[in-house]
Amino acid sequence: MRKGTIAPGPAGPGAWPALLAGVAVAVLLAAGCGQQAAPSAAAPSAAGPSAAGPAAAAPSAAGPSSPAAALSTGPSAAPSPAPSASLSMSPADRTACGEMLGRLTQVTQTISAGSELLTNSLDKQQLSQRIADQTTLLRQAADLMAQGLVPPRLAAADRDLVAALHAFADDFNRAASAANQGDLSAAAGAMNDEATVQRIVDASDTIEETCA
């Protein structure tokens, strides 16, 4: 992949659950594109912001997160192993950790940007194209995480993260095919891969906690 493709910025592993949930919500909502125009205008007066709030809030929950907090809004609240791990780390491993965290931040930034585009798709055709674009971003993210220095203690976590990103890209590839056929319900189902998302979250948390 091209090094300039993934731009660094303030996003990080902790945002994954909210970020990926936002993607699924966006696709489910877009499955009703063309049917939601009238109800959405009436919804605010009938139910107020709460009707549209949860769907709109999902992407924004991922956006403001800090570089290392964007992927783990839920499960990663116990960083107890981090201090002892970092204290026993060699200078070479600390350098490798810094590089890994930088790559992880770039990966999350890129996927977050792609997910925001998904949630802002105007119609089914645009959504279908953006699902395909997100597939490419996930593969680029996996390739980026496979590059560079990796501390020996994080080799397994890095391998699992790379494999999980590729698996999630495969999900998006299937979703793109379904979306191209107009079946956005099947597209949303293809991306609702909780086991793979959990692998991404777990591997990202391990990298963060070890390198903290």
Image: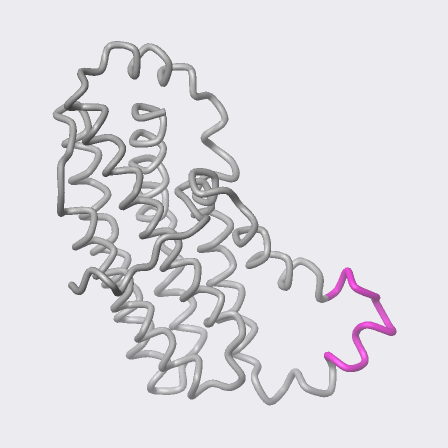
User: Considering depth in this image, is 20 or 193 the residue closer to the camera?
Assistant: 20
x and y percentages locating residue 153 in the rendered image: 17, 23
Quarter of the image where the N terminus is located:
bottom left
- Residue at 33%, 38% in the rendered image: 204
Quarter of the image where the C terminus is located:
top left
x and y percentages locating residue 163 in the rendered image: 18, 48
Q: Which stretch did the figure color magenta?
A: 40-51
Please say if 75 is above or below 46: above
- Residue at 25%, 63% in the rendered image: 4
The question of residue 41 being in magenta is answered with yes
Image position of 190 (left or right of 40): left
x and y percentages locating residue 66 in the rendered image: 50, 42
- The quadrant in which residue 126 appears is bottom left
- The quadrant in which residue 71 appears is top left
User: Considering depth in this image, is 144 or 51 the residue closer to the camera?
Assistant: 144
x and y percentages locating residue 89 in the rendered image: 22, 15
Image position of 125 (left or right of 85): right
- Residue at 21%, 53% in the rendered image: 142
Please say if 124 is above or below 108: below
Image position of 48 (left or right of 99): right
**Secondary structure mostly seen in the magenta stretch:** helix
Q: How many marks?
A: 0
The question of residue 120 being in magenta is answered with no
